[in-house]
């Protein structure tokens, strides 16, 4: 669990038993997240317990003053209309004397507008427990963080397996809105029925539903651009790889087929588990090399395939060209650098925050926003129209 107040971002991988830890003050949070150089985790935990033991609580102030905790809390949070000036003065003087410091979460949750927006990502098996390391997810979080910081919001991130975790998460923290990634149509419908907190969906596949805004990209056109580019480079046999043949992946593959012609495009469904994928590539390498190019529906799968081919002594793009999708940071950290379809995470983040504001104000009900994509040419595709001397 990490809480970083400088960047206005909280990471929450916890269940309810740990949620109260987020109500510690900033010093406690820093010790939990980063500790002190040279100290063990056990020593850091002991220091946290010491801080908590010594920390002045509202209940301590109330007991010393002979007041209710509600009265002291109201003074701390500026709700003093029904409290006498004398009582306010007494509370304020003791706060200064005792050095009381309210926790960041205490301050936010006491306000009508918490300024907290939650981002929840589906903990899918394909991530292998490393969902935040996925290129698309990490790029999206980075852009959302920058946009929320500009708009004066705090960002809390959670990986969840089921929709019911989202409802508890949002209500616990009095969130103003949510950005959701990777869940299915039924999950979104159940959420809409069970809570009134506005939310925006990244790449949802469902009919328009009241109270839900869907921010997607033109997956079909992305596939079409990939296919058109490969066609312009002289490729007539292209293999598409994905771990499924539904939703956005299907749209990307259909677009590629439309550009190249259905007879020119093949498909292989690769396993979700990494070890099984490596075995799959090894067993099917002969069939894969019957094609001149591969269109991978994500950069991760494209880069992974390049590494596997190179380990087997198979050159990219000399023996096989590869195109990805997303334009994640991975594209520039492999060789050859990966040609891909770019989606703009900054633009999507800007739209997401704008839509959440409109939903909260009642200016939006349901809307589908489709953002454009573009091809980024790098070094992973061979031009078959040129001779081998141009490799």
Image (cartoon, helix red, strand yellow):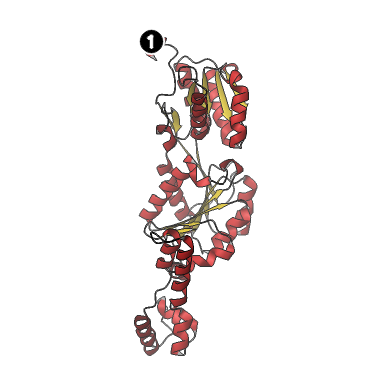
Which residue is label 1 attached to? 389
Q: Position of residue 43 (x, y in %)?
A: 46, 65
Horizontal side of residue 375 vs 277, given as left or right: left
Left or right: residue 73 compared with residue 188: left
Q: Residue at x 50, y 66 (%)?
A: 21
Measuring from the top left, give residue 63's x and y in whole percent: 47, 87
Q: Dividing the picture into quarters, in which one does residue 277 lie? A: top right
The image position of residue 196, as x and y in percent, is: 57, 59
Most foreground residue, 49 or 136 = 49
Q: Residue at x 37, y 87 (%)?
A: 90
Residue 116: in sight, yes or no? yes
Q: Camera-side residue: 32 or 123?
A: 32
78 left or right, relative to 177: left
108 in relation to 184, above or below: below
Q: Residue at x 43, y 16 (%)?
A: 383
- Crowd rating for badge 1 (residues with CA inside 10 Å; few <14, some 14–19, many 20+): few
Number of callouts in the render?
1
Q: From what the image shows, is residue 317 above or below residue 202? A: above
Q: Quadrant of residue 337?
A: top left
Residue 232 vertical position relative to residue 331 in the rendered view, above or below: above
Nearest the viewer among 310 and 93 is: 310
Q: Quadrant of the C terminus?
A: top left
Task: Give the residue at x 62% y 33%.
Answer: 276
Under circle 1, the secondary element is helix
Q: Position of residue 378 (x, y in %)?
A: 39, 26
Q: Is residue 196 visible?
A: no
């Amino acid at each position: 669990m990490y809480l970083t107040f400088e960047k206005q971002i909280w990471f929450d991988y916890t269940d309810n038993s740990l949620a109260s830890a987020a109500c510690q003050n900033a010093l406690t949070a820093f010790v939990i997240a980063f500790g002190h150089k040279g100290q063990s985790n056990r020593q850091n935990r002991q220091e946290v317990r010491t801080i908590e033991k010594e920390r002045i609580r509202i209940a301590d102030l109330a007991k010393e003053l002979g007041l209710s905790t509600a009265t002291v809390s109201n003074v701390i949070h500026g709700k003093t209309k029904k409290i006498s000036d004398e009582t306010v003065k007494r509370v304020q003087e003791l706060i200064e004397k005792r050095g009381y410091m309210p926790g960041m979460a205490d301050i936010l949750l006491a306000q009508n507008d918490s300024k907290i927006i939650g981002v929840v990502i589906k903990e899918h098996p394909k991530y292998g427990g490393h969902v935040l390391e996925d290129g698309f997810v990490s790029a999206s979080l980075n852009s959302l963080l920058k946009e929320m910081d500009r708009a004066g919001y705090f960002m809390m991130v959670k990986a969840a397996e089921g929709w019911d975790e989202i409802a508890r998460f949002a209500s616990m923290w009095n969130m103003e809105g949510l950005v959701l990634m990777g869940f299915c149509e039924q999950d979104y419908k159940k959420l809409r029925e069970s809570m009134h907190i506005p939310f925006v969906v990244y790449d949802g596949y469902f009919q328009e539903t009241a109270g839900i805004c869907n921010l997607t990209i033109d997956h079909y056109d992305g596939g079409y651009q990939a296919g058109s580019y490969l066609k312009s480079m002289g490729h007539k046999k292209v293999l598409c790889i994905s771990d499924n043949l539904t939703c956005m992946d299907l749209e990307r593959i259909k677009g590629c087929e439309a550009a190249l012609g259905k007879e020119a495009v093949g498909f292989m469904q690769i396993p979700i588990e990494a070890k099984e994928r490596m075995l799959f590539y090894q067993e099917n390498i002969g069939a894969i090399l019957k094609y001149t190019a591969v269109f991978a529906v994500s950069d991760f799968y494209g880069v992974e395939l390049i590494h596997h081919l190179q380990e087997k002594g198979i050159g990219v793009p000399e023996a096989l060209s590869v195109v990805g999708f997303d334009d994640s940071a991975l594209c520039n950290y492999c060789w050859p650098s990966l040609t891909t379809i770019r989606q703009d995470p900054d633009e999507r983040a800007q739209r997401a925050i704008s839509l959440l504001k409109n939903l909260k104000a009642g200016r939006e009900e349901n809307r589908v926003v489709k953002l454009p994509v573009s091809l980024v040419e790098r070094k992973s595709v061979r031009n078959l129209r040129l001779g081998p001397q141009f490799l």
